[in-house]
Image: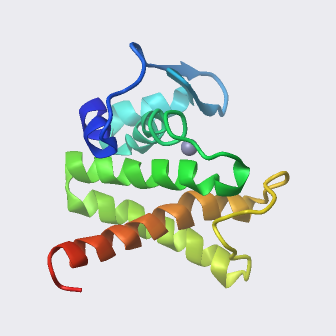
Amino acid sequence: MFRFFEEKAGMPYSGSVYTQVLAAGKVAQEMSGFTIIRESYGQEVLSDQRGIWLIAHELAHQWWGNAVTCQDWTHFWLNEGMATFMSAAYKEHRFGREEYLKDIEAAKARYLKVKEAEKDRSLVFPNWDHPSPEDRTLVYHKGAYVLHLLRKKWAKKDSGKG
Ligand SMILES: [Zn+2]
């Protein structure tokens, strides 16, 4: 996972140690050099390694969120959209294209639910002081979906199809 993110980011991990701590409760928070994840999630991954998305998401933040970060909260989607997208990309690398597309379709579905409720808005928030649950869905899932669309467009351009 480290090699994958280092290669995609084009830069080595900046620390000397990285730790993920499994803790009681519903915690999930990354910091420079370590991440706290809920203990029950660890049990889920032990029973099905395809559930590795959160481990990948939190590790991706060591590059997208910590090493490179937005200047202020208005571009918070660059942290969360990138980590969500890179988690799907890692799953593609490890388990195949189908796993990637499953995550992208799930992100798209969550985004479309917000859009159908007419709560869609720009990924750039002028004020992130009081985000709603829909706002959080936008930065994580619309963000990842937009990055997927950019990847698709880039791949077509790269192959000379568009
Ligand atoms: Zn995150």
In the visual, does 39 lie left or right of 59?
right
Give the image location of residue 127, x and y in percent.
Answer: 81, 58
In the visual, does 24 lie left or right of 146?
right
The colour scheme of the drawn protein is rainbow
Residue in the picture at 79% in, 56% down: 131
**Rendered view: 122 above or below 73:** below
In the visual, does 40 lie left or right of 7?
right
Residue 87 showing in the rendered view: yes
Residue extending furthest toward the top: 16
In the visual, does 22 lie left or right of 49?
right
Residue 106 showing in the rendered view: no
Residue extending furthest toward the front: 71
Residue extending furthest toward the left: 159
Give the image location of residue 21, x and y in percent.
Answer: 52, 19
Give the image location of residue 126, x and y in percent.
Answer: 78, 62
Q: Dividing the picture into quarters, in which one does residue 132 lie?
A: bottom right
**Rendered view: 117 above or below 105:** below
Where ligand 1 lies, by image quadrant? top right
Q: Dividing the picture into quarters, in which one does residue 105 lie?
A: bottom left
Give the image location of residue 100, x and y in percent.
Answer: 31, 59
Quadrant location of the N terminus in the rendered image: top left
Residue in the picture at 46% in, 42% down: 57
Residue in the picture at 30% in, 31% down: 2
Residue in the picture at 67% in, 28% down: 25
